[in-house]
Amino acid sequence: MLVLPILLLFILGTIELGRMFLILAEATSASREASRYGASVGADGAGGLRYLDCAGMRAAARRMFAISDVPDSAIAIAWDHGSTDQTFATCASLPALGDVQPGDRIVVTVTLLYSPIVPLLPLPEMPIVSEAARTILINIAAGPTVTLGGPAVTDTPAGPTSTDAPSPTPATPTATATGPTPTASDTPIPVPTDTPGPTNTPWPTPTPIPAPGTFAASVTCTNGQVLFTWDTVSGADYYAVYEVKSPPPDMMSCLTNRSRCDYSYIPLDGNPHTFYVYAYVDSSHSAASNLQTVSCPPG
């Protein structure tokens, strides 16, 4: 009876210590997986870019949780220029495509709260924080033969020139001991012909991307939801809707591979909000579409 309380305390302490290390491992793995997802090359399932897909990064983080129930606020995502004191965007205000440059980073911070399951143990609640940062692989070619910016030109060595080949020396005729002396005849010397070198292939001229036509916007003022529609641009990979900001830069409001978007919202403040849409092929965008302005009275 004297040993049993001490034994139970030891067992419960071991369990709590194991839970603490498990939560720490979850936070570490979640931050690493989310930053790895956001830094990788390619598009997400909806046709957008991974390094702008906050929902995809949070989903990658949640796959690492075994015992923790984590809200979105516990998975903080930010973009910086190489240092955490150079943060220029968060999921609350996504960066525009032109704002993200080579060398910028995705920074994911996961905060989990540890609290003992047995209140009898003298262990306080404590936050467990893990932060992971990865450089965004923007404009990185994938595969051993892929080049960026145009076809690669391989220089083929030029053919021989007239000075490269030695001139053959005509053989000296000899006379035999008997018979008439042969008359030497001149053997024509072959003149080598210069082989022209290869002609460099010019860089292809990019085809201008037409701007999306008939851009329209309608707003539901009960909740500020804005519906955008526009004409499909042939060959476009995806589209991005931007809100005009003063001062610049403009803020991205929607990123999609469809010719509509219905998950943008404006505040119910009575102020006008002006939007336009770009069509994108790879990382190049078209001219801006026509402008649309919507507003809702203060609610």
Image (spheres, grey):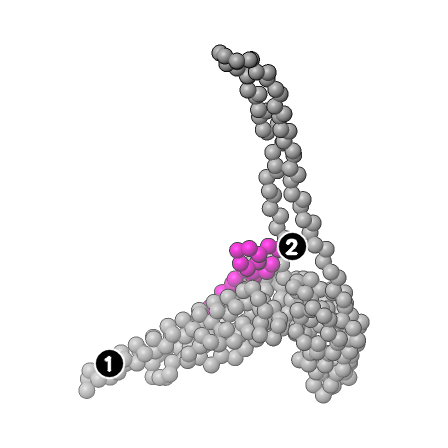
Residue receiving disc 1: 6
Quadrant where the N terminus lies? bottom left
Predominant SS of the magenta segment: loop
Q: Does residue 147 appear left or right of residue 215 in this picture?
A: left
Q: In which quarter of the image is residue 99?
A: bottom right
**Callouts 1 and 2 close, C-beta under 8 Å:** no
Along the line of sight, the residue nearer the viewer: 33 or 261: 261
Q: Quadrant of residue 88?
A: bottom right
Instruction: Give amino acid for label 1.
Output: Ile
The answer to whether one can see residue 46 in this image is yes
Along the line of sight, the residue nearer the viewer: 34 or 45: 45
Residue 285: image x %, image y %? 71, 64
**Above or below: residue 2 compared with residue 236:** below
Residue receiving disc 2: 149
Instruction: Give amino acid for label 2.
Output: Gly
Magenta span of residues: 130-149
Residue 208: image x %, image y %? 75, 62
Q: Which residue is drawn at 75% across and 76% down?
A: 230
Q: Residue at x 49, y 11 (%)?
A: 177
Residue 98: image x %, image y %? 67, 62
Q: Residue at x 53, y 55 (%)?
A: 144
- Eye-nearest disc, 1 or 2: 2
Distance of label 1 from label 2 (alpha carbons): 71 Å
- The local secondary structure at tag 1 comes to helix
Q: Does residue 221 appear left or right of residue 60 in this picture?
A: right
Q: In which quarter of the image is residue 158?
A: top right
Q: Residue 148 magenta-drawn?
A: yes
Along the line of sight, the residue nearer the viewer: 115 or 151: 151
